[in-house]
Image (tube, helix red, strand yellow):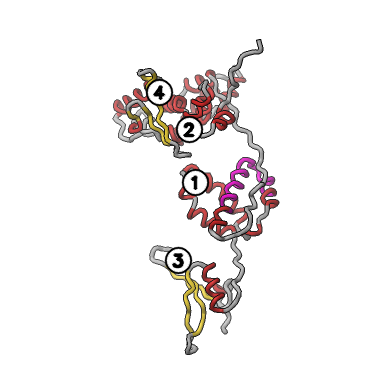
Amino acid sequence: MRPKKTANRDLPPRMLRRVRNLKSGGQWVGYYYDGRDENGKRIEIPLGTDLDVAKMEWAKLDRKAVPKIVRLLGDVFNRYERDVIPGKMPRTQKDNLLSLKQLRAAFSEAPIDAITPQILAQYRDKRSGKVRANREIALLSHIYNMAREWGITEKENPATGVRKNKERPRDFYAGPEIWNAVYQYAAPELRDAMDLAYLTGQRPGDVLSMRAADCIPGFLQVAQGKTSKKLRIQLNTNNRPNQLGLLVERLLEQRTERGVRNPYLITTEDGRNVSASMLRLRFDDARKAAFNSSLEDKVLAEQIKLFQFRDIRPKAASEIDDLTQASRLLGHTDKRITETVYRRIGEIVEPTR
């Protein structure tokens, strides 16, 4: 038998790989058994396009034991990115791809069955980003669960039981002084976004994606981008417009006055919708101006410097007296999340006497 070509040296004896370039620009890869027909004439018997299945078919024809399939984690990462991540919400996709980049750098060349809890613990301890390390190990855990479902491995999930780094929830609260200082220097569209974020308690991305069509009689409809949770936030209280209702009325009137063609509630004075980057730049400018004007009060200035737009959601949660109502507004299924992560001021209690 002639020596195998370099392209087939990773395959069992008499197994061939055929690669064809497609018009679409991709490649088709198929596997064949280099055999003989009943007259001794050489023939190539198709084994399929899946390498694992092809090796099993090869074993039947060659009357050999099925070779041990060694799968590298890089291949599993590719399948997970192709088949699983696209089905997640856009924000989660972005976060998964960021974590996957770090996992590839560390584990792509490792056989899937070679990873142990000890290895993951070492990875956790060496990562400088402690919170990011937690996210990456959590993602790897799900990847292993999927690999078990796909039949790629029968090994126990090595991430099970691996201790996570301790995380401290952000504890910043934007009190009235801080809010007013930044609000004073905010561009009109930033003020609108801040008001809408505070009164609805929603995430920045959800605030910017609110549309005029979401305003139906008596309600502002919200579909949260992160969780797909749907809410209908009341625009009236005791049959009269509440603060959110008055804000929505004003934003709708602004759209008419500005001749806005896009569907969004938050727009610039010249009718453009406000993107996430535009919001960030405007907030940074307002915060910088507020910081510079408050330098005489160093404590306040430092607090202003820490203020971020994302702190408006926990501000809203903190300033609603009823925890259940706050949790429902934020779209949480568990009140403990609202209480431990988003409530950033102490509960009001009575003294002993």
Residue at the image position 59 percent from the left and 66 percent from the top: 69
Region in magenta: 122-144
Q: Is residue 314 magenta?
A: no
Looking at the picture, which amino acid does disc 2 mark?
Gly
Give the mark nearer the N terminus: 2 vs 3: 3
Question: Which numbered disc, 1 or 2, marks the residue closer to the eye?
Answer: 2
Q: Is residue 272 left or right of residue 141?
A: left
Q: Of the numbered discs in the image, which one, if any, rests on residue 331?
A: 2
| Residue assigned mark 3 | 27
Do tag 1 and tag 3 residues touch (Cβ < 8 Å)? no
| Residue 145 vs residue 173, the one in the foreground | 145
Q: Quadrant of the N terminus?
A: bottom right
Give the mark nearer the N terminus: 4 vs 2: 4
Give the mark nearer the N terminus: 1 vs 3: 3
| Residue assigned mark 1 | 93
Do tag 1 and tag 2 residues touch (Cβ < 8 Å)? no
Do tag 4 and tag 2 residues touch (Cβ < 8 Å)? no
| Residue 279 vs residue 316, the one in the foreground | 316
Is residue 163 visible to us here? Answer: yes
Work out how far the residue at label 2 is from the one at label 3, CA to CA, in angstroms: 46 Å
| Residue assigned mark 4 | 244
Query: What element does badge 4 sit on?
Result: helix
Give the mark nearer the N terminus: 1 vs 2: 1
Q: Main secondary structure of the magenta part?
A: helix
Work out how far the residue at label 1 is from the one at label 2, CA to CA, in angstroms: 20 Å
Looking at the picture, which amino acid does disc 3 mark?
Gln
Residue 298 lies, in percent from the top left, at: 61, 20
Residue density around tag 2, few if under 14, some if 14–19, many if 20 or more, within 10 Å: many
Looking at the picture, which amino acid does disc 1 mark?
Gln
Q: Is residue 126 magenta?
A: yes
